[in-house]
Image (tube, helix red, strand yellow):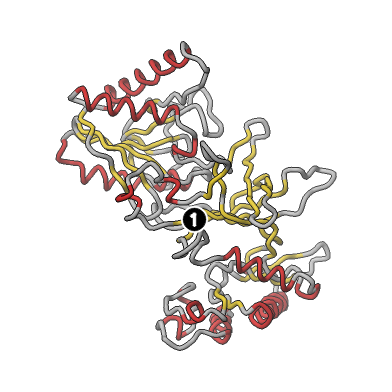
C-alpha cells in the first residue's frame, strides 16, 4: 500500500504547485510528500520502532537538502502516517501513531502540537495531538469521490496554511543564514518582544501529553562578539489555564515578577534566585486583529464548541531569566556545597518573609550554582512553577503532591491537610543533603 499512498500524495503536491503558479497572487505551497523509504526506523530515533510513513516538506523545517526525502527523520517530518491493510484495524493504527508522535516533539523545538494520519484500507482519518487529548476526524473513504475530495482538501489546506496551523511555533524559528534558532519572548509589562539566539537546548520534551516544557540557554540577538550579552535561561511551557482570566493556574510568571520587584534592590541576594528579564503569554499573529494569546482555544478556534468545551484549557507562556546556573552535582568540594546551600536557603528565607511566596518544590534539580571568574561559587534557587502565595487561603493549603518523591516532606508525601510552611522545604533540604 505504501507506493500508491506516496504516489497519490505526491500527485496532489505537484498539481497544487502548478495551480498556484498560474494564479495570482503568487504563494509558495509546502510540497508535502512522503519520505521515499517506508516502514523504517527514524535515523534520529532513540528506539527501534518502525514508522510506516511520514510527510516531509520544504517549508518551516531547518536544514533541508536534496536527500531529505530519502532518509526518514522525525526532525524533518510534518506529520506521521500509520497504515493498515484493513478498516477493522483502526484502533491499532491509533495506538501506534500515538506511540510514535512524541518523536516529533523530541526533535522539533518549535512544535506546539502535532498532526497525524491513519490509513486503514480505504479509510483515512486525520488526528490532532494536543496536550491532553487526541482528536480524530470523521472517516474519509478514498474509495468514494466525496472521500477523495475531502482527503485532497486536507492535503491542500496543510500545504497552504500558516505554519502555526500545521503545529509549528513561528516565535521559535530557524535562521538559515546564521544556522541558529531565534526565540521571541513577549514581555507582558513592557509590551515589547525580545528576540534571543539559542545557544543550546537544556531540556526538550518527549511526551505526548503534558506541559511540553522546554528550556534553552540563549543570548540577546543584538549582542556581538565585542559586546557579548549575558546568557539567559528561556523556559517554555503549556500550563493549565486559571478558572478565570487568561493566566496560568500555577502562575510562575507572577511569582518571578513579585520576587524581582521586592528583592531587586538587595545586592546581598543578587544572583541567588531566578531573576525575571522578560516573560508573558506567547503571542501568535491573528488574521484580523494584531496578536492573540497562544492557548488551546486558539488551536481549536475552528472546531465546534462541543469539541472545544471538552478540552482542558492551557496557556502557552515563556520567560527569560538570569543567571544561568550549573548542575549541583558539579560542585568540587563539600565546602562549595555548603556555600551553595547557604546562599539558596538565604534566598528562600527572604522570598518567604518579604515576598510571602513558598517554593514547595526543593530538589537537586532546583538548586544550582554559578561560578565567577575567580572560581568562587554562588548558590542559585530556580523554578517557581509550584510556588504559591501564602496569603492566598486556596493556594497555601493545596493537598496535591508537589515535587520529586525522594525529596518530599512527609506532609507533602501523605497529602496531609496540615498547612504547608517553609519547614516542609527545609525538610526537603535534609533529604537533598
Is residue 203 something that shows in the picture?
no
Q: Residue at x 65, y 68 (%)?
A: 368
Q: Which residue is mark 1?
A: 315
Q: Residue at x 72, y 69 (%)?
A: 261
Tell me: residue 287, above or below residue 381: above
Q: Quadrant of the N terminus?
A: top left
Could you tell me residue 252's position as x and y percent? 57, 65
Q: Residue at x 57, y 44 (%)?
A: 291
Task: Please state which of residues 318 and 103 is positioned toward the viewer in this rendering.
Answer: 318
Q: Is residue 249 left or right of residue 119?
A: right
Could you tell me residue 221's position as x and y percent? 72, 43
The picture quadrant where one finds residue 290 is: top right
Task: Please state which of residues 215 and 28 is positioned toward the viewer in this rendering.
Answer: 28
Tell me: residue 163, above or below residue 12: below
Please identify the residue farthest to the top as the structure is shown.
Answer: 22
Tell me: residue 286, above or below residue 360: above
Amino acid at each position: 500500500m505504501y507506493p500508491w499512498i506516496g504516489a497519490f500524495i505526491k500527485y496532489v503536491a505537484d498539481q497544487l504547485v502548478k495551480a498556484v503558479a498560474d494564479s495570482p497572487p503568487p504563494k509558495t505551497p509546502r510540497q508535502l510528500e512522503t519520505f521515499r523509504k517506508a516502514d523504517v526506523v527514524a535515523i534520529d530515533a532513540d528506539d527501534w520502532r518502525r514508522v510506516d510513513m511520514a510527510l516531509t516538506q520544504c517549508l518551516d523545517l531547518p536544514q533541508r537538502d536534496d536527500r531529505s526525502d530519502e532518509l526518514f527523520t522525525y526532525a524533518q517530518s510534518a506529520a506521521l502516517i500509520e497504515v493498515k491493510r484493513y478498516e477493522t484495524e483502526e484502533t491499532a493504527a491509533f495506538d501506534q501513531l500515538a506511540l510514535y508522535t512524541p518523536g516529533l516533539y523530541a526533535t522539533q523545538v518549535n512544535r506546539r502540537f502535532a498532526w497525524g494520519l491513519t490509513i486503514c484500507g480505504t479509510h483515512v482519518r486525520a488526528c490532532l495531538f494536543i496536550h491532553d487529548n487526541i482528536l480524530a476526524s470523521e472517516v474519509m473513504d478514498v474509495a468514494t469521490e466525496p472521500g477523495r475530495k475531502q482527503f485532497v482538501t486536507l492535503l491542500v489546506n496543510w500545504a497552504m496554511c500558516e505554519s502555526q496551523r500545521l503545529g509549528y511555533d513561528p516565535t521559535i524559528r530557524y535562521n538559515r543564514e546564521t544556522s541558529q534558532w531565534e526565540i521571541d519572548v513577549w514581555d507582558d509589562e513592557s509590551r515589547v518582544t525580545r528576540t534571543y539566539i539559542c545557544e543550546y537546548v537544556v531540556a526538550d520534551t518527549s511526551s505526548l501529553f503534558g506541559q511540553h516544557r522546554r528550556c534553552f540557554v540563549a543570548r540577546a540577538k543584538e549582542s556581538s562578539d565585542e559586546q557579548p550579552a549575558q546568557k539567559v535561561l528561556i523556559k517554555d511551557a503549556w500550563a493549565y489555564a486559571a478558572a478565570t482570566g487568561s493566566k496560568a493556574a500555577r502562575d510562575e510568571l507572577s511569582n518571578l515578577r513579585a520576587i524581582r520587584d521586592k528583592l531587586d534592590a538587595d545586592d546581598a541576594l543578587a544572583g541567588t534566585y531566578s531573576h525575571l528579564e522578560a516573560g508573558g503569554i506567547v503571542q501568535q499573529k491573528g488574521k484580523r486583529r494584531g496578536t492573540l494569546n497562544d492557548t488551546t482555544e486558539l488551536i481549536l478556534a475552528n472546531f465546534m464548541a462541543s469539541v472545544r468545551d471538552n478540552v482542558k484549557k492551557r496557556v502557552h507562556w515563556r520567560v527569560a531569566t538570569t543567571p544561568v546556573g550549573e548542575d549541583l552535582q558539579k560542585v568540587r568540594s563539600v565546602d562549595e556545597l555548603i556555600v551553595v546551600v547557604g546562599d539558596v536557603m538565604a534566598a528562600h528565607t527572604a522570598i518567604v518573609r518579604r515576598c510571602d511566596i513558598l517554593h514547595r518544590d526543593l530538589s537537586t534539580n532546583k538548586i544550582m550554582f554559578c561560578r565567577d571568574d575567580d572560581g568562587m561559587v554562588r548558590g542559585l534557587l530556580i523554578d517557581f512553577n509550584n510556588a504559591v502565595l501564602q496569603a492566598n487561603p486556596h493556594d497555601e493549603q493545596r493537598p496535591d503532591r508537589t515535587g520529586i518523591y525522594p525529596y518530599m516532606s512527609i506532609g507533602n508525601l501523605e497529602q496531609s491537610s496540615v498547612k504547608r510552611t517553609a519547614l516542609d522545604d527545609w525538610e526537603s533540604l535534609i533529604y537533598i543533603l
